[in-house]
C-alpha cells in the first residue's frame, strides 16, 4: 500500500537536516517516487540527493527560492523537462522565530509570511497547470500544531498565524481543484525530534514535553508516513483535510 511508483514528487525545504524535509524526501523515494529535492541550500540539496540515490531511489536536485515567482516557475520547467509531469507537491519549506507581539517588527512578520504562506502559494500556483492538464495531483502542506493551539512549542505569533493561514488556503484550494483530480491536504505536526528540538534548553524542553500526553516528541518517520499516505492512491477521496500528529498535545 501507499506505493508511489512512477510518480514525480517535489519536496520544498528538503535540503536541510534541521527539519523533516529530508525525511519526507527519503520516505517518498522509498515508496517509489522520483523526488525533486528543492531548497536554497545547494550543499544540502546534494546531500539529500545522494542519500536517496544511495538507498536505490531516483532524485533531482533543484535550487529554489520559494519566495520568488520566477524561481518557482523555473523549477517547474526543469522538472517537466526531466520527467514530463508533476504528481505530488509537498510544501515543507518554512521558517520560525521566537518573539512576542510586543517585540515583533513588521519586517519580522513579513519575513515569516513570505516563506511560510506566500512562498507556499507561489510554489502551489506554479504546479497547478501541469497537474490540471494531467487531471491528477496531490498537494500536501506542512502546517503546525502552533496554528491550532496558538503557539506553545516553537516560534512566535507570526509563525502561528502563517501556519493557520496555510490551513485556510488549503481548504479553499481543495474546493477549486477537486474536479481537476487534484487533492489538497495538510499535516499539522507537534513537537518532532529534529535538530531544532534538540537545540532547546533543557528546562524549556521538559516544559514542552510536559504538555504532551504521550510524553515524548514525535519521530520524523511518524510525520512522513502520513504524508506518504496523503500522496498515495489510497487517499484519493480525501481533500481539504488536516491531520494532527502531535502525541495528544492538541485534540480537536
Image: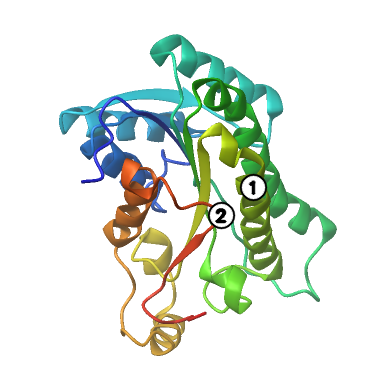
Report the disc number at residue 175: 1
Residue 179 sits in quarter: top right
Residue 128: % across, % down: 60, 29
Task: Check contact, mark 2 vs mark 1: CB within 8 A.
Answer: yes
In-front residue for pair 163/241: 241
Q: Residue at x 52, y 70 (%)?
A: 145
Asked whether, in this view, residue 21 is left or right of residue 106, the answer is left
Q: Residue at x 36, y 88 (%)?
A: 213
Apparent side of residue 187 relative to residue 22 in the rendered image (left or right):
right
- The residue that appears at 61% across and 38% down in the rendered structure is 177
Give the percent coordinates (x, y) of residue 106: 84, 58
Is residue 42 or residue 120 the one in the foreground? 120
- List x then y, in percent, for residue 31: 23, 39
Looking at the rendered structure, which numbered label has been put on residue 205? Answer: none
- Per the image, the residue denoted by label 2 is 240
Q: Is residue 44 visible?
A: yes
Q: Position of residue 182 (x, y in %)?
A: 52, 37
Q: Is residue 116 visible?
A: no
Q: Residues within 10 Å of mark 1 (few under 14, many from 20)?
A: some
Q: Secondary structure at mark 1?
A: helix
Q: Residue at x 61, y 51 (%)?
A: 170
| Quadrant in which residue 100 is drawn | bottom right
Amino acid at each position: 500500500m501507499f506505493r508511489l511508483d512512477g510518480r514525480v514528487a517535489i519536496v520544498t525545504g528538503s535540503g536541510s537536516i534541521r527539519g523533516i524535509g529530508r525525511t519526507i524526501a527519503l520516505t517518498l523515494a522509498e515508496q517509489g517516487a522520483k523526488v525533486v529535492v528543492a531548497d536554497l541550500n545547494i550543499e544540502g540539496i546534494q546531500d539529500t540527493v545522494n542519500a536517496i540515490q544511495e538507498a536505490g531511489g531516483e532524485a533531482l536536485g533543484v535550487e529554489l527560492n520559494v519566495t520568488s515567482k520566477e524561481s518557482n516557475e523555473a523549477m517547474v520547467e526543469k522538472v517537466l523537462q526531466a520527467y514530463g509531469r508533476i504528481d505530488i507537491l509537498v510544501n515543507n519549506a518554512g521558517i520560525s522565530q521566537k518573539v512576542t507581539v510586543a517585540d515583533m517588527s513588521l519586517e519580522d512578520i513579513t519575513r515569516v509570511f513570505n516563506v511560510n504562506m506566500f512562498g507556499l502559494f507561489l510554489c502551489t500556483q506554479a504546479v497547478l497547470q501541469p497537474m490540471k492538464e494531467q487531471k491528477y495531483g496531490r498537494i500536501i502542506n506542512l502546517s503546525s500544531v502552533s496554528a491550532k493551539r496558538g503557539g506553545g512549542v516553537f516560534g512566535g505569533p507570526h509563525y502561528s498565524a502563517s501556519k493557520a493561514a496555510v490551513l485556510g488556503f488549503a481548504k479553499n484550494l481543495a474546493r477549486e481543484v477537486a474536479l481537476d483530480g487534484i487533492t489538497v491536504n495538510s499535516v499539522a505536526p507537534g513537537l518532532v525530534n529534529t535538530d531544532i528540538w534538540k537545540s532547546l534548553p533543557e528546562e524549556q524542553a521538559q516544559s514542552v514535553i510536559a504538555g504532551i500526553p504521550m510524553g515524548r516528541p514525535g519521530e520524523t518517520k511518524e510525520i512522513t508516513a502520513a504524508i506518504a499516505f496523503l500522496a498515495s492512491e489510497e487517499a484519493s477521496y480525501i481533500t481539504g483535510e488536516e491531520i494532527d500528529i502531535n502525541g495528544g498535545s492538541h485534540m480537536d
